[in-house]
Amino acid sequence: MKDKFIELTLGSYIISHGFSSKNKEIMEPITSENFAKKLIPVSRIKSISEKYILTDYVDGRWIYWEYAEDYDAVKKLLV
């Protein structure tokens, strides 16, 4: 089955690498000066908020992407 993609304008992001031995989330913020259009497979999207879209990544990592679109517009692309 072919995966569906949506195009979003993404900027800075935070990589979640998992948890430390003391159960503290290991976060790596990456700052971007600009936003860029990217195609995201819908199957990788786990949730959206008004500021971030959460996607899964390799090796069990998660990425919180800032996006430029309106929340309701993104929601319509996914519903």
Image (cartoon, rainbow, N blue to C red):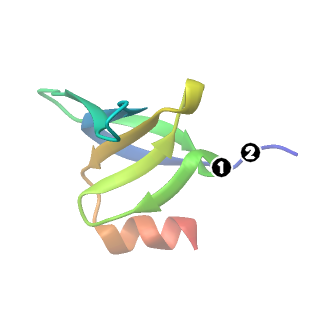
- Per the rendering, the mark at residue 3 is 2
User: Residue extending furthest right?
Assistant: 1
Q: Quadrant of residue 19?
A: top left
Residue 58 vs residue 36: left or right? Answer: right
Given contact means CB atoms under 8 Å apart, are the residues at marks 1 and 2 in contact? yes
Provide residue 5's location: percent of width, then percent of height. 61, 46
Between the C-alphas of marks 1 and 2, the distance is 7 Å
Is the residue marked by circle 2 packed among few (<14), some (14-19), or many (20+) residues within 10 Å?
few
Q: Measuring from the top left, give residue 78's x and y in whole percent.
A: 55, 66
Q: Is residue 50 above or below residue 33?
A: below
Q: Earlier in the sequence, mark 1 or mark 2?
A: 2
Residue type at mark 1: give it: Ser
Residue 18, position as x, y percentages in the image: 42, 34
Question: Which part of the image, by quadrant, shows the C terminus?
Answer: bottom right
Q: Nearer the viewer, mark 1 or mark 2?
A: 1
The residue sitting at 42% across, 50% down in the picture is 54
37 lies above or below 66: above
Identify the disc placed on residue 43: 1
Counting from the top left corner in percent of width and height, residue 59 is at 57, 24
Q: Is residue 42 left or right of residue 12?
A: right
Horizontal relation, residue 36 to residue 79: left or right: left
Foreground of the two, 72 or 14: 14
Mark 1 neighbour density, 10 Å: few (under 14) some (14–19) many (20 or more) = few
Q: Residue at x 24, y 51 (%)?
A: 68
Query: 25 or 70, which is in the foreground?
Result: 25
Q: Residue at x 52, y 65 (%)?
A: 77
